[in-house]
Image: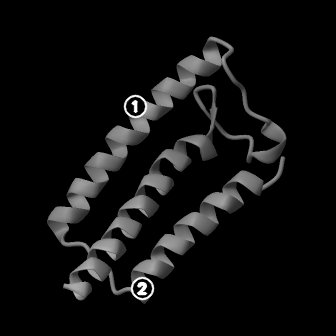
Amino acid sequence: MTLLYAGYLALALGGAFLLMHLFRITFSVYQTNAIAIALTLTAFAFAMWDILAVMRGHWSFDFSHTLGMLIFNQPAEEVIFFVVMPFLGIVLDEIFKKKGEKRK
């Protein structure tokens, strides 16, 4: 059991918050609620996909690189991945929008 997968997720999430700070990205309450709903639905959909794929034997996980905590048949990090990575994408999109506005 190692922290490799969790470490990558921590770097991605930390990077997202660092970028938000550096580029002064903020979200309104409305945006925050919309993001939370979108991330929840996305994580649920992809986690269900992963659960079925593992049950059918399409792929598996190397648990020597995870914390060992499972959510159904998924490492906790896999489910967290489906929240962290889309959030990073949202932050990057906001940065690109902000940079595009400055060019006009």
Identify the image quadrant of residue 25. bottom left
Q: Amino acid at mark 2?
A: His
Q: Is residue 7 left or right of residue 79?
A: right
Q: Position of residue 34 (x, y in %)?
A: 21, 55
**Residue wearing tag 1:** 45
User: Which of pointers 1 and 2 lies earlier in the amino acid sequence?
Assistant: 2
Q: Amino acid at mark 1?
A: Ala
Q: Is residue 76 above or below residue 4?
A: above
Residue at image position (43%, 53%) is 86
Residue at image position (67%, 60%) is 8
The residue at the far top in this view is 56
Residue at image position (40%, 34%) is 44
Tell me the tag on residue 21: 2
Q: Is residue 82 above or below residue 87?
A: above
Q: Is residue 11 left or right of residue 25?
A: right
> Label 1 to label 2, Cα distance in Å?
30 Å
- Image quarter hosting the C terminus: bottom left
Residue at image position (25%, 63%) is 32
Q: Is residue 103 left or right of residue 44?
A: left
Viewer-side residue, 93 vs 12? 93
Mark yes or no: residue 66 visible.
yes
Crowd class of label 1 (few under 14; some 14 to 19; many from 20; radius 10 Å): few
